[in-house]
Image (cartoon, grey):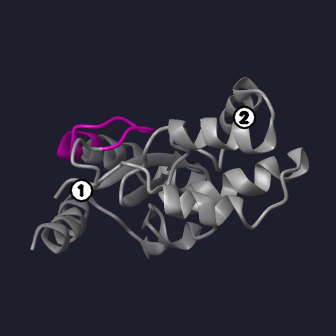
Amino acid sequence: MKIDNSIDYNQLSNILNKYKQEKRFTLAILQDIQTEFNYIPKEAVFHLAEYLNIPVSEIYSMATFYKALSLTPKGKHIIKVCNGTACHIRGSNILIDEIKDLLKIKPGETTADGLFSLEIVNCLGACALAPVMVIDNKYYGAMTKEKIMEVINEYKEAAYD
Ligand code: FES
């Protein structure tokens, strides 16, 4: 399975048409684009610049400033490993190394098949379950190397079945 990163211009038009051609809507439009495409495609940046009649560089600087926006495609599943204090004490680094080994990616990267992205985050508010990993919005507590392999395999099987 390969995630298709080509941009659907109808989807983009639907987003742009919701907003007046005013600069104050730049961030809101970028957030919608991020939600729709899971990242901010280059083509969308150029279209938005034209639509709002503002420089492309201005949109790029906004897209790089806000953490919720990404200029590179994210995986279908976002794996977040908590490296807050409680999780760190209980071995989150071992989990991070295991995921890096299993998926051959570093934090901030996406697997070649587009299935997973890995992010390291601070406290996820579930310290009692440390060490904690979240995939999309699902929490996995008391994680071990063995459990990680099982969970990741479940997602792979679901994607490739
Ligand atoms: S430190 Fe990991 S959930 Fe709080």
SS at mark 1 in the image? helix
Q: Is residue 104 magenta?
A: yes
Tell me: 141 left or right of 16.
left
Q: Nearer the viewer, residue 117 or 72?
A: 72
Q: Which residues are magenta?
A: 100-110
Tell me: 41 left or right of 68.
left
Where residue 105 appears, as percent x and y from the top left, is: 29, 37
Query: Could you tell me which residue is drawn at 52 percent across and 39 percent down?
Result: 43
Q: Are marks 2 and 1 in contact (CB under 8 Å)?
A: no
| Residue situated furthest left in the rendering | 161
Residue type, label 1: Lys
Residue type, label 2: Ile
Tell me: 112 left or right of 59.
left
SS at mark 2 in the image? helix
Query: Could you tell me which residue is drawn at 45 percent across and 67 percent down?
Result: 136
Q: Which residue is mark 1?
A: 145
Q: Which residue is mark 2?
A: 59
Q: Is mark 1 within 8 Å of ligand 1?
A: no
Check the image and report above or below for 46 versus 127: above
Q: Residue 78's quadrant in the figure?
A: bottom left
Is residue 66 visible to the viewer in this orientation of the structure? no
Query: Could you tell me which residue is drawn at 79 percent across and 43 percent down?
Result: 52
Dominant secondary-structure state across the stretch colored magenta:
loop
Query: Could you tell me which residue is drawn at 77 percent across and 57 percent down?
Result: 28
